Image (cartoon, rainbow, N blue to C red):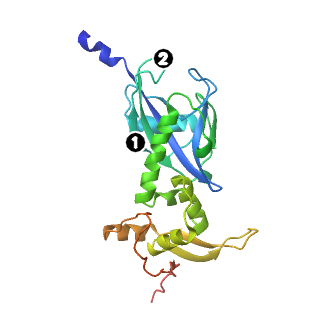
Amino acid sequence: MNEFNEYFKSAFTVDNVIFGFDEGDLKVLLIKRGEEPYHGKWGLPGYFVYPNEDLDTAAKRVLEQLTGLRNVFLEQVKTFGTVNRHPFGRVITVAYFSLIKISHYTLQPSSIARKAKWHSVAEVEDLAFDHNDILNACFNRLKWLVRSRPVGFELLPPKFTLTELQHLYEAILETKLDKRNFRKKILTMDLLVDLEETQEGVAHRPARLYQFDRNRYEQLLAEGLSFELKESKRKEPSERKPRAKRKPQQLA
């Protein structure tokens, strides 16, 4: 057994990349570390995995302990194992990521987290450890997902405007989208319900409000729907109006 001792000297951690969208800006949740190494530096919410704990359980526990966030769905993205990534020894980390509505959660930093704060993804600078690499890997994963599945709706409030939806996709894809083409593409997917409502309390002309129809998406997915936001070289079919909000049926 002694010949295998060297193989059991590595530690495991989990690091969580939590994305949110607020005021037209894609944000990521960071903590200010309260212990060495990198004391006082911003980094991702992450810590060690207990010896008797599986990875998914550890990711949820660490996220709650450091930020107060509970009941957050976490997807495992990638493992990072560069030999010298941790100054105290060999530490292998597993990255998780999630999309949440910022307004639905209250941050309560504790444990090694002196602070927990949302930061604009575009303005994140040098983070602790290799957390910039981890953030970039999860950001690329988000870009891939948003082109293939309607995950962007997870970041929006239940009622949203087409402008808010476009700004979200522009923030994730880091590109400016043509307003007319984007709206035509989204509306022809037949995934939005026109709530027949408009914004309230805004200085500009109130925009119409929509809602994502998840049941309709599941139905279309079963029929072979391909959710892609790529520009089509073919002429798009005539624009269909989103369906009006359904009225409850009268019982006889």
Going by the numbered disc 2, the residue's amino acid type is Phe
**Where, quadrant-wise, is the N terminus in this rendering?**
top left
* Residue 124 locus on image (x, y percent): 60, 39
| Local SS, label 1 | strand
Instruction: Look at the image and tell me in which quarter the C terminus lies.
Output: bottom left
Nearer-the-camera pick, 114 or 25: 25
Residue pictured at 59% horizontal, 32% vertical:
126
| Residue 122, picture quadrant | top right
> Which quarter of the figure has residue 179?
bottom right
For label 2, the residue is 88
Q: Label 1 sits on what residue type?
A: Gln
Q: Residue furthest right?
A: 203
Q: How many labels sit on residues?
A: 2
Q: Position of residue 151 (x, y in %)?
A: 46, 57
Q: Is residue 190 above or below residue 66?
A: below
Label 2: how many Cα within 10 Å (few below 14, some 14–19, many 20+): few
In this rendering, position of residue 15 left or right of residue 21: left
Q: Give the quarter of the image for residue 190.
A: bottom left
Of all residues, the one furthest to the top in this rendering is: 2
Residue 107 in picture, x, y percent from top left? 62, 42
**Label 1 crowd bin: few (<14), some (14–19), many (20+), radius 10 Å:** some
Left or right, 94 with respect to 34, comes to: left
Give me the C-alpha separation between circle 2 and circle 1. Answer: 25 Å
Q: Residue at x 31, y 14 (%)?
A: 6
Name the residue carrying label 1. Answer: 76
Question: What residue is at 40 percent from the left and 59 percent from the top?
Answer: 148
Q: Between disc 2 and disc 1, whose residue precedes?
A: 1
